[in-house]
Image: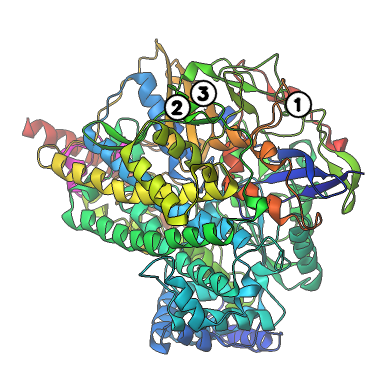
Amino acid sequence: METHEALYQQGVARMEQLRHLKPRHGETLQDKMLQNGISRRDFMKWTASVTAMLALPLPFSTLVAEAAELANRVPLIWLHMAECTGCSESLIRTDTPNLDSLIFDHVSLEYHETLMAASGWQAEENLEHALETYKGNYLLAVEGAVPTANNGAYLTVGCKGHTGLHIVKQAAAGAAAIISVGTCAAFGGIQAASPNPTGAKGVYEVVDKPVINLGGCPPSEKNIVGTLMYFIMFGKLPALDMFNRPKWAYGARVHDNCERRGRFDAGEFVEEFGDQGAKEGYCLYKVGCKGPYTYNNCPTERFNHHTSWPVLAGHGCMGCSEPNFWDDMADFEKPLGRQLLHGLDATTDTIGTVILGATAVGIGAHAVASVFAKSEEE
Amino acid sequence: MSKRVVIDPITRIEGHLRVEVEVDENNVIQKAWSSSTLWRGIEVILKGRTPMDVGLIVQRICGVCTYSHYRCGTEAVENALGVKIPLNAKYLRSLMQTSLYMHDHIVHFYHLHGLDWVDVVSALSADPALAAQVALKYTDKPISAGEGDLRAVQERVKGLVETGKLGPFANAYWGNGTYKFTPEQNLIALSHYLKALEVQRVAAEMLAIFGGKSPHPQSIVVGGVTSVRDMLSPARLQEWKQKHAIVNDFIIRAYKADIVMAAEAFGTEPSVLGGVNVKNFLATEDFLLGDGQYMFNQGVIMNGDLAGVSDLNPDWIKEDVTHAWYKADGPQHPFDGTTIPDYTGFVERDTVYGKLPTVDGDGKYSWVKSPRYQGEPVEVGPLACLLVSYARGNQVVVDAVNGLLSATGLPIEALFTTLGRTAARMLQTVIVAEEGLKTFDALLTNLQSDESTYTKPEIDPNKEYVGHSMIEAPRGMLSHWIRIKGGKVENYQAVVPTTWNAGPVDAAGNMGPYEASLIGLKLEDPTKPLEVIRIIHSFDPCMACAVHVMDFKGTNLGEFKIDPNGF
């Protein structure tokens, strides 16, 4: 892992490189912001918050600012596979009004089926044009899993009737970086749940290049935009965990930053939805919370402009940013107990495993304690 | 000499849709085929799982109407188990649905459908000062349509166009003769397209207040809702109401005004004055207002006969797979259906773009089945919902519809058009937003004496349960059907709005609403079929919803090989 100084230098070099690319249009970000009533001060505040979100020291905020201004040179191709469009819906909710829509404006969005004006033959032309013109330089985002059974015949896109599998492979070949947006593209998601009738797979399983996996059903808008920003700034993938998820977003357990953690430590549990404990905000472990097994920044960043997240709304975490969670964590409203999962990161996070072990013991102790507390009340 | 036009992907929709049409020498459409090109098998995956997980799983059918399947699936389980949920839970579910509609319909009109009506390039030649005056014709309080706002929007878009790199606006149908707005009107609508990006975020926050997040909220469980703390917080309740006010303001001052403007500009454009060729409509009652009253009524209208509106009978719903990529002996009711994949691929033929793989109209050509009501194709959606409530004499709906007709000077027949379908969606948004406040007030009243949000469900593993739920989703009537055995899901079937609308021809040769809507349409340029895309978008397609399957007889899907060389 490089030092921050080395990373900073890499960022500076990357900005220099971007400056030599042809801009998508002449107008600067600053002009656009002024037109939209956003001051330089608002912008700097935003860059500071993005810097913090990416777990970088504050001096990096100048790089974030520069990257935002140069982002219009980076072509983005966004493909839809076997999906529900929830990840695109998450993208359009990006959380700093006006400014993020400018960022969206500034990345050169070459292909995105939900948002583009062209349709049919003309849409396909746009894709072909972008793949050719920006070969080796475009960012590829994929939403949805890739059906592979029967040579991918369960999904075809475009007048030429190519399978999704064919299109992903073709687009991956010329991509500067590939981002799987959401659990479906990352790990197969819902259609890959048992018995996986279409042979749905994550993108990384069908291409021979590194893929950044943004787990989440859907991932928050911040995790999508933040990852794009990282690539634009440094021209490389961010530090990743064992499932290739960026550590800045997926580095901590939901349980560790949970607002109800104090209730867990005090042995105060919701026993049934709607009970007194639910009204008091007790821990949701016994009604199925998968926070102890899930790595994501939901408790700190929340969703929809920090409006809420499932635990605040009284429902446990369902583990949606983890591989195979539809099968491994099923029966979502029951506690998982001390079940062995797909292997939490033992190589980089032995401490985490130790803590998890301690937690399971702790959960048992708390459960016993709360039974006593209950009988005393009675 | 007829020519084949292939449109794939239909963009600005949810999911994957292919439409093909055949035009005669005058470029008038003679035949049309609607084909869904993705199959995900979600209902197969449900089999054998706990019914308590059904809502969370079926929610992933669609991330756009994200909440609809969650609620409908959960309520199908509640119906099967006989669970009666507390009134507060009903109100909260209704308020979440109100939030969803306010979000979904705005995004559909501006970001998915909008560019079929608005010529972005034309807006560049508008006079912003004149446009500000024009905006005042359609409402006395325009939003984001002052001279300064409009000039800023114009300069912003101009900057993009001058580079010759249009990004998401590239290679579209700008300049097509069926774009009817003046440059000034285009500029007003373009300004609202950008403003709506901002407003839709607020609408999504409304859903997140009681839902935890949007898309894919996570606060409904079999037996009630979990967001009890949000419900009991006066600040949280007012946060919802405040955001409601912001979004509602946009609905009235922009969305409604823009539809009135469109009715004026497109009122004589032939390509949007047809498009309702299946004149059967179906809707269910939904949106609990309080005191057991619902905002919209249930019913069925056949052959456009509003006076003959009848009660919806769920027993009369059957699905036909004659031209869908499944095998079956005949039309089947959702409880008894089999769904066995039978993919036959495409057939190569000449098209206006040269030789291409195309659908085999004589054989099977879509992953969408064809639901029928008493054997007849039926349109569902906002237009159907309003027509049914109108026919029932629902005063709120009658006043809203008559109000719009008098504001635009159009006769009632104007509703039975593409323009009418798009206008109906706006009217439904207005009604849902305004009437939704009655639900909010009913919740406040009930909270004074009742804080319950949950009834614990019981499942007896030795019993077999059957249940269904019908709700009015943003795209129309949605029904989920479940059979539970041994405490697990035994069968599952979803009959969804886009299946009703987008299904292929049935055994009797009847086209579904999508295909029928295109017959007789004249295209300006068959290689750039904007008119087709506009009509299809007016239905608000949601293909991931439409494509579903449940293997009721336990057949091993692995036995059915698909020929990869079929295209």
Which residues are drawn in magenta?
A266-288
> Residue at (75%, 62%) from the top-left corner?
A127
Q: Earlier in the sequence, mark 1 or mark 3?
A: 3
Question: In the figure, is residue B276 to the left or right of A283?
Answer: right
SS of the residue under disc 3: loop
Q: Nearer the viewer, residue A338 or A285?
A: A285
Residue B342 - label: 1
Q: CA distance from mark 3 to mark 2?
A: 46 Å
State the SS at label 2: helix
Q: Nearer the viewer, mark 3 or mark 2?
A: 2
Q: Which residue corresponds to mark 2?
A: B307
Dot 1 falls on a residue whose secondary structure is loop
Query: Residue placed at 66% from the left, 40% from the top?
Result: B517
Looking at the picture, do discs 3 and 2 lie on one chain?
A: yes
Query: Quick one: label 1, few (<14), some, or many (20+) residues within 10 Å?
Result: some
**With respect to residue B190, does B391 lie above or below?**
above
The quadrant the N terminus of chain B occupies is top right
Q: Amino acid at mark 3?
A: Gly
The Cα atoms of the two marked residues, 1 and 3, are separated by 24 Å
Say which chain tag 2 marks. B
Tell me if residue B159 comes above or below residue A257 in the rendering.
below
Q: How is the image coloured?
A: rainbow
What's the mark number on residue A332?
Answer: none
Q: Residue A201: give x, y in percent of width and height.
A: 66, 44
Q: Is residue A276 magenta?
A: yes
Q: Chain of mark 1?
A: B
